[in-house]
Amino acid sequence: ADGRLSRRVKRTQLKRADRAIEKLIRSYQQELGLLTDVSRESLVFATVQDLVATLQIIAADEDVQVVRVKNRLDPSYDAKASAGYRDVALNLQIVTPYTAELGIDTHVCELQLILVRFAELKSEEGHKRYVEFRNARGE
């Protein structure tokens, strides 16, 4: 695989069941339909311009339904809510005849678009600090 691409696509595992249950209870009052980040991936960008170009491509794709955009790069976003972390998180559905045939056309997944300087903060140590922050907030 192209080494540059492997540095830009950050593969993640499915959200662990215990964390999904915790999030449902703490953040969503057990409303299962609100849990939209069980399946997620990250794309890392060197520039805001590249990130915006990707957003435009996604928005123009007829097979992709954008369900929600959480823009943590917006200057009006209060970064204290995420311990300083910033990204653009998209909740998406892939709607094609094939996904409909499989019965997954209503599945919502999350795609995180991240600038490289924030992606570097998502190290194992950085994630531990975020978990502590999240737990202190009861999220």
Image (cartoon, rainbow, N blue to C red):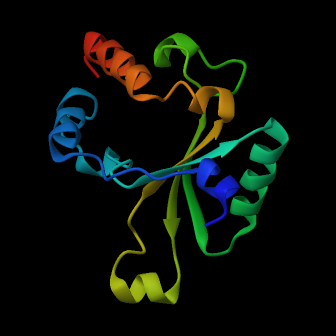
Is 42 located above or below residue 47 in the figure?
A: below
> Percent position (x, y) of residue 85?
55, 22
> Percent position (x, y) of residue 62?
67, 74
> Percent position (x, y) of residue 20?
22, 42
Quadrant in which residue 51 is drawn = top right
Q: In front here: 122 or 92? A: 122
Rendered-image quadrant of the C terminus = top left
Instruction: Give the residue at x 61% y 75%.
Output: 63
Q: Is residue 92 left or right of residue 1?
A: left
> Percent position (x, y) of residue 27?
28, 29
Quadrant in which residue 22 is drawn = top left
Instruction: Give the residue at x 43% y 52%.
Output: 40
Is 104 located above or below residue 42 in the figure?
A: below
Rendered-image quadrant of the N terminus = bottom right
Q: Is residue 33 left or right of residue 11?
A: left
Q: In front here: 60 or 45? A: 45
